[in-house]
Image (cartoon, rainbow, N blue to C red):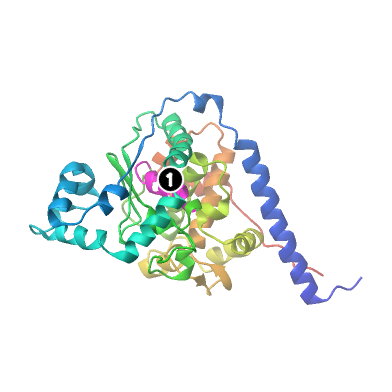
Amino acid sequence: MHIPARLRTQLAALSAAVLVLFTACNRHDDQCELDPNVAKVPVQVQVERLEKSFFQIQTPADAERFVREHGLFARQALQSQQYPAGMLSATLTRLASNTELRKLGQQADTTFRTEQLEQELKPMFQHIRYSFPDFRVPPVKTFVSGLSQDLFVNDSLIAISTDFFVGPEAVYRPNVPRYILRRYTPEHVLPTLALAISNKYNKKELTNQTMLGEMVQFGKSLYFAERMLPCTPDSLLMGYTDKEMAGVVFNEGKIWAHFVEKNLLYNTAPFTVQKYVGERPNIPEIDKTCPGRVGAWVGWQIVRKYMAEHPNVTLKQLMAERNAQRILSESRYRPKPRRAER
């Protein structure tokens, strides 16, 4: 039976979307119930909300008191020591009295409930401590930054700017391109945080930076986030739309062929590497519909294949592995382009 070309294309896209949905549901449904061994890991999570005390600031004296009472947060997240005398207090006073920021702060307060945040953070931290027993949960604080910084993460503090993640209903949103803006929703808080925490453990080769090295480096971070948040869809971890995710899955072989045929894997030119793993709305060098950062997504698939081939390798060992070529070679990653429909 003859099927028109346009219909074949639509059917192919539909089948790809169904495949992505089935794969995501199947993978995550099997892993959403917390592993009993992970559930035993002792973790205490207490989120301190700083928004209320921040919006009580009316004078520079109030701001100075806020800085003293929240010294760790002020030193690290606000970098108080970088300000000339009196400037931080004046800045905080101006922000706290801003009517529009107060509206955004009210939306953030309604969107993010303390108990819910603590319940969502706890299993992620348990997963991290299960794989990395030396991990200690730092104090977690939320704040309204005036859309100046989304997260601050180090060993001694996690600060989440809730105003960044209110979502499409926010009275004000971060001043970033639309393809990045869609990653600032409540559902993206934990994936963004997990990716940030992965940097603590994700080792890399410091010399001879290649496209492959950057791809695998990002791939390890995404694999880390996947393991810490096993119920989270791939689209949220990547920050792709469902349509983009369906497209890259369906065209995985074509995308890989582009990297191989163009001799990109061992390219060391920073501009070229950035084109494929950095922030861009799309990558027309592959296809106008190919989303940005697809090199990171391919790196994720390489790491997944490597771990599937080496079931005895722990997450800690993976993150410590600096040799991207070894990961690629031992992964046996060889996706083939799909044959054209007839």
User: Residue at (36%, 44%) from the top-left corner?
Assistant: 203
List the residue tagged with mark 1: 194
Circle 1 SS class: helix
**Residue 198, image quadrant:** top left
**Residue 337 percent across, percent down from the top left:** 67, 62
Q: Quarter holding the N terminus? A: bottom right
Image side of residue 193 versus residue 297, left or right: left
Q: Is residue 139 above or below residue 300?
A: above
User: Could you say which is closer to the camera, residue 224 or residue 150?
Assistant: 150
Image side of residue 136 versus residue 70, left or right: right
Q: Is residue 219 above or below residue 167?
A: above
**Residue 68 percent across, percent down from the top left:** 15, 44
Image side of residue 56 versus residue 42, left or right: left
Taking the magenta stretch, the answer to whether it contains residue 80 is: no
Q: Amino acid at mark 1?
A: Ala
**Residue 200, image quadrant:** top left
Q: How many other residues sit within 10 Å of disc 1, few (<14), some (14-19) or many (≥20)?
A: many
Observer able to see residue 147:
no
Give the residue furthest to the left: 85
Observer able to see residue 26:
yes
**Residue 187 percent across, percent down from the top left:** 50, 51
Q: Quarter holding the C terminus? A: bottom right
- Which residues fall within the magenta stretch? 188-201
